[in-house]
Image (cartoon, grey):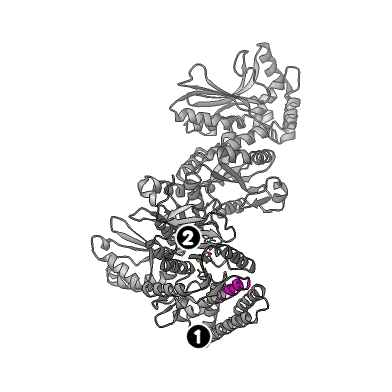
Amino acid sequence: MRVLKFGGTSVGSVANINQVIKIVSQEAKNDRICVVVSAVGGVTDMLMQCGLQAAKKEDYNPVFKELETKHLQFVSELVPNDSEAVEETQGLLNDLNSLLNGIYLINELSPKTVDKLLAYGEILSSSIIARAMYAQGLDAARKDSRDLITTNDKHTKAGVNYKVTNSQLDYYFAKAKQQITVLPGFIASSATGETTTLGRGGSDFTAAIVAAALDVDQVEIYTDVSGMYTANPKLVKQAKPIESISYHEAMELSHFGAKVLYPPTIVPVMSKNIPIRIKNTMAPEDAGTLIHNKEGISDNPIKGLSNINNIALLTLEGGGMVGIPGISKRLFETLSNQGINIILITQASSEHSICLGVMEEDAGKAKNAIDEEFQYEISLNKIDPLSLEIGLSIIALVGDQMKSHQGISGKMFSTLGKNNVNIRAIAQGASEKNISAVIAQKDVKKALNSLHERFFEAQRKQLNLFITGVGNVGEKLLNQINQQQEYLKKHLNINLRVLGLSNSRKMLIDENGIDLDNWKALLEAGEPATLDGFHEAVVNQNQRNSIFVDITANADVADMYGKYLKQSVAVVACNKIAASSEFSKYSELKRLSKAYNAPLLFETNVGAGLPIIDTLNNLIASGDRVNRIQAVLSGSLNFVFNNFKSGESFHDVVQAAKAEGYTEPDPRIDLSGVDVARKILILARESGLKINLEDIANEPFLTEKNLNSTDVPHFFETLKEDAAHFEKLVADAEAKNHRLKYVAQLDNGKASVGLQSVPEGHPFYDLKGSDNIVLFFTDRYPEQPMQIKGAGAGGDVTASGLFADIIRTATY
Ligand code: ADP
Ligand code: ASP
Ligand code: MG
């Protein structure tokens, strides 16, 4: 004998029922089969809705009609031309309608009536399915579970009388002749013959009760997913079916919300050591999950994650609680008297407060009862009125083996912390099969995904990018990402996705990742952009490992970093404004980055893609001390002075540099040295100095007239007018066989920028094109400095510098 249970979705359409029949007919070739069926998917909820409407004297007819049409259509398609089937189904529907009418008339829906009402779901489905099997030539007959399963009269969640039930089941199946018996799940009857139900989701339980009574080899629960997963697959895409799991683990997971199995199901089969196999009706060839008495052998002590939503946290607190025995007893008794189920308990060892998790629907009742119970203590101010918080969820890590592994809760909490998930309460069962935390319901998806990544995808990390600024550099970065995505997955186990894009006009968010082959058109069709709107969208996405990437040169964008960091969103910027703003701003951002565990990286602020800041940070982290930095940090100035020879026009060289995109749109920012000063400022700060832009000595090589020019065209005019000044600079240098270089220095805590003429043989002398060079003189590199040299400007290298920062966030 085998017991197979098919859930609501499995019998949710004609095609699915035919699939069920196919599976059953296959299995019935070798053995007698007991098939337990649920109501057609969604029907139990619809019945409840009708009942509630009727009890409120509302019109339940539209929903009832829908139920009627659905079932009659199933009959006409599954058992065509069978008037008896139509008659039976119509008869049941008529009875149902009379019941609803009765509820409507008396204006009341008692638990007893709820059971009568909901039972129609399984009664109808089992009747139609049994007939359909018979019509397709199977030796199938239906039997009403109410004749076989006897319970107490605790309506809506009745307790089974196993003694009576087992003998009834034994007796019936010993005599039954048919190969296939179809039983309605979920329903039973009390000793007095009233219809009862076993609790929502209870068809699983029916199957287990039958299996245990008949002592079968295995129960098979067919559902709409291929087993019990490492987390709810509807919330965590990366979740995987668990191959093998112990009864205790499965019970714990289902208690904490893994709906795939109704928790009491385990009880009857566990005592008889009958395994449960969870399988997928639509993919019966998949192995599914085996639930049995063995603790699985796996390297991972965690078996799965689960969550329960709609939780309320009750906190009883007060100085008067300390040392007084009996407070907890009174608290628990009060809740028990109200029939309120406590899902989680924590008490600090100070005994100053007790925290309880209950379902939100029970919270109001709980608060009234507890405040009343402790009325006297509250009036004396010994205990505060109960505090109540709603909108919460419990998430749990489950695994029998957790007890023998250290550091799991640490990893759990640090992962949640890193992703800005606030933990309201924590509980760990003494058996250590479960660690649970109470968090805001809005954070559940992110929490489950980050924990899943941490515990089940050890190596695979997802990075979620939100990019602002898609000009030249931005476009290059997107191309590089598009090209490298597969490589990163394969070789670095990084899943890099772009979820948000914006320019100054439009913004686009896609939680599944923006198609990078088509981003321009998609962005163009996006919503109007605002900085706050984009920030809000990033926050609403609430994705783990989120990174805000700033590829603008805009001060308002830089002003947003703090807001992102406070949400634990990492910031990667090539925009120099934040890192070179007042020291207080810079250090506040650094503080936020630390406090919220969110990387703040701006490698491309200095030397584009060259690893200058990273090297500096590594030198310092490894205990070296930077004594002097000498650098050529302006690609634009280098380009200008590499091309400016005696006898040529300085004006023309600058104009050419501008035309080729080597300077800022306003070349004065480069030529005045401000840009280089900002860069050495950043290096000075990263080496530990508290300094500001005003502290940097800047001896300009431009003339007063140049510096006082009113706008860019005027500036170019003044370059022509002062041509002699520039000619002299270059001629003097050439006379000594020197070359002009714009140099930034940090020496003994003092920073300066200015034009220098460097002799042949100097490391700067042969610097080509727009290359940058940095020399670090440190304790460990005293004479021969550490040198970093290479292209210091250009879209591609800047984009790859940003790319490197993005990847760096993954290792934080
Ligand atoms: P049935 O109608 O077959 O009884 P249920 O809807 O009761 O099916 O249970 C199956 C559903 O349980 C899945 O579709 C999935 O959404 C949900 N679920 C929640 N947690 C898990 C988990 N850890 N593994 C598998 N499914 C889960
Ligand atoms: N039909 C019932 C419910 O929806 C029982 C079940 O499907 O397991 O709760
Ligand atoms: Mg179910």
Expressed as whole percent of the image width and height from the top left, the position of residue 375 reads 30, 72
Expressed as whole percent of the image width and height from the top left, the position of residue 215 reads 42, 65
Q: Amino acid at mark 2?
A: Ala
Which corner quadrant of the image does residue 713 belong to?
A: top right
Instruction: Describe the element under mark 1 as helix, strand or loop.
Output: loop
Q: Which residue is mark 1?
A: 107
Expressed as whole percent of the image width and height from the top left, the position of residue 457 reads 51, 45
Which corner quadrant of the image does residue 489 belong to?
A: top right
Q: Amino acid at mark 1?
A: Asn
The label on residue 328 is none
Residue visible at 51% across and 85% down? 103
Question: Is 305 situated above or below 517?
Answer: below
Is residue 144 in sight in this rendering?
Answer: yes
Q: Which residues are magenta?
A: 127-137
Q: Does the magenta segment cover residue 129?
A: yes
Instruction: Describe the element under mark 2 as helix, strand or loop.
Output: loop
Out of 537 and 53, give the one closest to the viewer.
Answer: 53
- Name the mark nearer the viewer: 1 or 2: 2
Q: Does the magenta segment cover residue 647?
A: no
**Is disc 2's CB within 8 Å of ligand 1?**
yes
Expressed as whole percent of the image width and height from the top left, the position of residue 613 reads 54, 31
| Left or right of 809 in this view: 327 | left
Is residue 259 in sight in this rendering?
Answer: no
Q: Which residue is mark 2?
A: 258
Q: Judge the density around disc 2: few (<14), some (14-19), many (≥20) Cα neighbours within 10 Å.
A: many
